[in-house]
Image (spheres, rainbow, N blue to C red):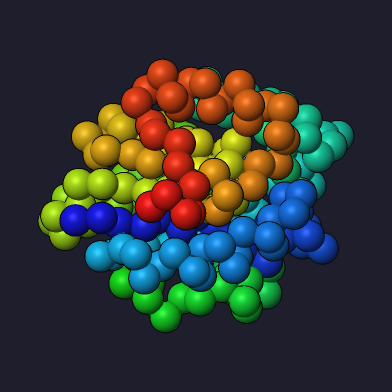
Amino acid sequence: MKTLLIIDVQNDFIPNGSLPVPNGDQIIPVINKIQDKFDLVIGTQDWHPKDHISFANNHNGKSVFDEIEIHGQPQTLWPNHCVQGTAGAAFHPDLNTDKFEAIFRKGTNKTIDSYSAFYDNGHLKSTGLAGYLKEKGTTQLFLCGLAADICVYFSARDAVKEGFDCFFIEDASKALDKDVFEKLKKEMIAMGIQMVTSTSI
């Protein structure tokens, strides 16, 4: 079973959103085009309460992109983004979601961030995605979306730990920081994640 996991293609991560990924909108036609190649298509959404601990404006004297420590984990402070029920949290209107069999929401607990589609950042709470994919018979998991260096990276890392054969679709993903992602790509390859393009699937 070949599954496509589309991560966080939401308005706030697209240019003109509150936390824009450079050229993030360019991946949408690619993602739409490849969906027919998969047996199962799943989407994820960042889905934060407005008082989420990762938002800089919820910390007096702190600024966006400052780093603090929460539950013993480093935490980057972000601009408010993907607040539950807002237009910014919605999937981009050009993204074809008709084939999405399920949508997994993350970051719903205001006291801890959740980059991965599988677990929060402290690995305290599962989203249930791993069990869902295994019950569906997924063996090969292809990941794409926003941002490649954050939520896609952490999702891929957890997917490998859960035993899936993982593939990262390079032209269907964009990074918030391209230089950081070049280093992370080497880590992903070392973990056994295969780098592919939409045309090679």
- Residue 78 lies left or right of residue 45; in this view the side is right
Q: Position of residue 70 (x, y in %)?
A: 57, 28
Quadrant for the N terminus, please.
bottom left
Residue 100 makes an appearance in the image: yes
| Nearest to the observer: residue 119 or residue 143 | 143
The residue located at (46%, 76%) in the rendering is: 97
Q: From what the image shows, is residue 116 above or below residue 12?
A: above
Residue at 63%, 71% (x, y): give it.
92
Above-or-below relation of 161 to 113: above
The reply, left or right, for residue 88 in relation to residue 102 is: right
x and y percentages locating residue 134 in the rendered image: 17, 50
Measured as percent of width and height from the top left, residue 81 is found at: 69, 57
Rendered image quadrant of residue 73 = top right
Q: Which residue is drawn at 67% across and 27% down?
A: 180
Q: Is residue 62 above or below residue 142?
A: above
**Which x, y percent locates residue 147?**
61, 46
User: Camera-side residue: 83 or 21?
Assistant: 21
Residue drawn at 45 percent across, 27 percent down: 188
